[in-house]
Image (cartoon, helix red, strand yellow):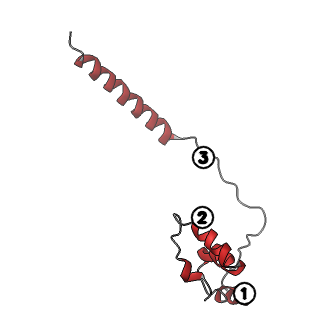
């Protein structure tokens, strides 16, 4: 008895099932008609950034990803050492890059 015939039939059935599922997925549900707004259309204008946002962005002296290590360094050398040890496999920080001498 040849089992190859059964494998071919199973592959054909699986291919047909995938084709049917793809057809149904791409067909999707019909879209609902979109209604027009009854009032006037108002757009937000973000062309002029505020002066406070520009000043806040320029106050940063280090990347935002280093906020945690900078906080730990401000708490002291032991807190910095523990933070660097705890996150060594994530950030790979070097102690002397952040320690105050």
Where is residue 66? Give x, y as percent: 60, 76
- Which residue reaches farthest right? 39
- Drawn side of residue 64 relative to residue 56, left or right: left
Residue in the foreground of this view, choosing between 72 and 51? 72
Residue in the foreground of this view, choosing between 29 and 52? 52
Q: Mark 2 to mark 1: distance in Å? A: 39 Å
Residue 50 tag number: 1
Q: Nearer the viewer, mark 3 or mark 1?
A: 1
Where is residue 88? Give x, y as percent: 54, 66
Q: Mark 2 to mark 3: distance in Å? A: 52 Å
Counting residues from the start of the chain, the first of labels 3 and 1 encountered is 3
Residue at numbered disc 2:
86
Say which element carries label 1.
loop
Residue 31 tag number: 3
15 shown above or below 56: above
Which residue is found at the position 58% from the left and 80% from the top? 63
- Drawn side of residue 67 relative to residue 40, left or right: left
Which residue is found at the position 66% from the left and 85% from the top? 57
Where is residue 29? Give x, y as percent: 57, 40
> Is disc 3 in contact with disc 1, using a CB cutoff of under 8 Å?
no
Where is residue 53? Give x, y as percent: 70, 85
> Is disc 2 in contact with disc 3, using a CB cutoff of under 8 Å?
no
Q: Residue 86 is drawn in which quadrant? A: bottom right
Q: Nearer the viewer, mark 2 or mark 3?
A: 2
């Amino acid at each position: 008895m040849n089992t190859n015939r059964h494998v071919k039939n199973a592959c054909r059935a699986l291919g047909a099932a995938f084709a049917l599922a793809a057809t149904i997925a791409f067909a999707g549900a019909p879209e609902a008609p979109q209604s027009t707004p009854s009032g006037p259309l108002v757009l937000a204008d973000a062309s002029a950034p505020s002066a406070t946002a520009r000043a806040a962005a320029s106050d940063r002296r280090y990347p935002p990803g280093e906020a945690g290590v900078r906080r730990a360094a401000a708490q002291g050398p032991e807190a910095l050492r523990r933070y660097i040890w705890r996150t060594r496999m994530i950030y790979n920080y070097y102690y002397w890059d952040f320690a105050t001498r």
